[in-house]
Image (cartoon, grey):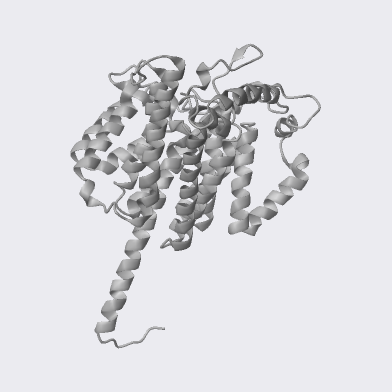
Amino acid sequence: MELGLGLTTIIPPIVYIGGLAILFMTLFYKVEYGLYFLIPILTQQSLLEHLRGYPLGKDFVDLLFLVLIVKWIMTQDKINSKTPHRKSMKALLPMVILWTFVTLWVGAYVLGTGNPVSMSDPRFVHWKNFTMLPILYFIVVNNVKDEKQLKIIFILMTVSMLYMDRSFYNNFAEKDHSSFRNDLRVGSTFAYLGPNELAVFYAQNTIILLIVWLAESQKKLKWLYGITTIFNYYVLMFLYSRGGYIAATGSMIFFGIMKDRRILVLLAIVGIFWQSLLPVSVQQRILMSTSEKKDHSIEARYDMWDQATILIKSSPIFGLGYNITPYVGIKTESKKRNSLHNGYMQLLLEQGAIGILIFLLFFMACFKLGWRLYKNGKNDFMKALGLGFAGCVLAVLAGNIAGSYWFYLNVSGFFWTFLALVVRSLELSDEKDEEVEAADEKKKTVPREFSYA
């Protein structure tokens, strides 16, 4: 963890002690303290790794989730959870959790490993970590009480991304990037994940930041959002991830068509003059997909997909089991493969047609919620959040064409948080409408000195 401030050895104990204090403050005082601590730290895996040497350090995030759940149960009557905006998630999220659990058992049957519900089973641990994402949604949507808290969380997420940008720059700045080499593909704060996962994270979250930046009127926040947006896209460019490029471009085209034609003009200029505008190393990375000198990674993916197709045909409806890909013997160039580098094919292999249908219905519902907020949000911030989230959904769908990233807490934690913020924004907008209607009714019964147009 390179902080560049001479504080590398000091920060972990400070975070650990502060985190313990947050646990107690959350449990015995206010739930928002836990939210404000948990959400921005989800992307700081390299920092969390430094906590492993402390008591309960390796399970710190799990413990914080547990405390938030307990506090949520203790205070669940404070927020109306019966609004129509939650209906689709109340139907789909139990289906997501249930079907992934069913296919966890399917995989145990296929592999002959017996009862998979054990912390010694890596597939169960993977499933447990994935279920933390919908749990995160439920925690946030049931505990964000007002627009002020909603904006605080958004600002903290922005600052977290800004720190990620700085971490990447520290790893990348001294390298010679005049031409592309694989060793240029450095990471940031995602300790166990590579540049492709990081690029998709940036692509799906920065479109929200971009749109909110353009809509923001408060000067300090506009500077914060603008600087972070620019740095995010800078990092994305030098992650050399073609999947990230596709996801970012798709989301920006959506924004350009739906709201701001200037984005389309900018994309057109880059598309026409990209060989003059983009750094040489980025051009070379893009050209590796189409040049006569074949990219071995692309060849390997075709080989993997051929092998996966045969396996999919053996169980197309139910799949072979949750997170079973690393255990079914898919190899390329004698190298074992843990991922198919295609989220849709991997979903089909592991969870079958039922699983992929559930996930597509979930993302369709997410898009509709974002679009609804864009149309019905009570202010510019909420409208921008809604449109940005709709673009984020498209970026997720595009980014997972080249990989299976939607099950990682680091990559998708912000997505599920934004989903909760969108739903709460819709509810807060409805409350505002009810207040306006009540005020209008009152005006009808009270004599007025002025008439309003």
Q: Which residue shows up at 53% across the image and 17% down it?
A: 328
Q: Which residue shows up at 73% across the image and 34% down it?
A: 283
In front of the other: 432 or 33: 432
Q: Is residue 319 above or below residue 262?
A: above
In front of the other: 129 or 191: 129
- In the picture provided, is 360 more to the left or to the right than 429? right
Question: From the image, which quarter does the C terminus lie in?
Answer: bottom left
- In the picture provided, is 292 more to the left or to the right than 221? right
Q: Which residue shows up at 64% across the image and 21% down it?
A: 183
Q: Is residue 388 above or below residue 318?
A: below
Numbered-mark total? 0
In front of the other: 411 or 2: 411
> x and y percent of residue 190 in the render?
48, 27
Corner quadrant of residue 414: top left
> x and y percent of residue 405 in the render?
52, 32
- In the picture provided, is 298 more to the left or to the right than 81? right
Residue 155 visible from this viewpoint: no
Q: Which residue shows up at 35% across the image and 22% down it?
A: 51
Corner quadrant of residue 8: top left
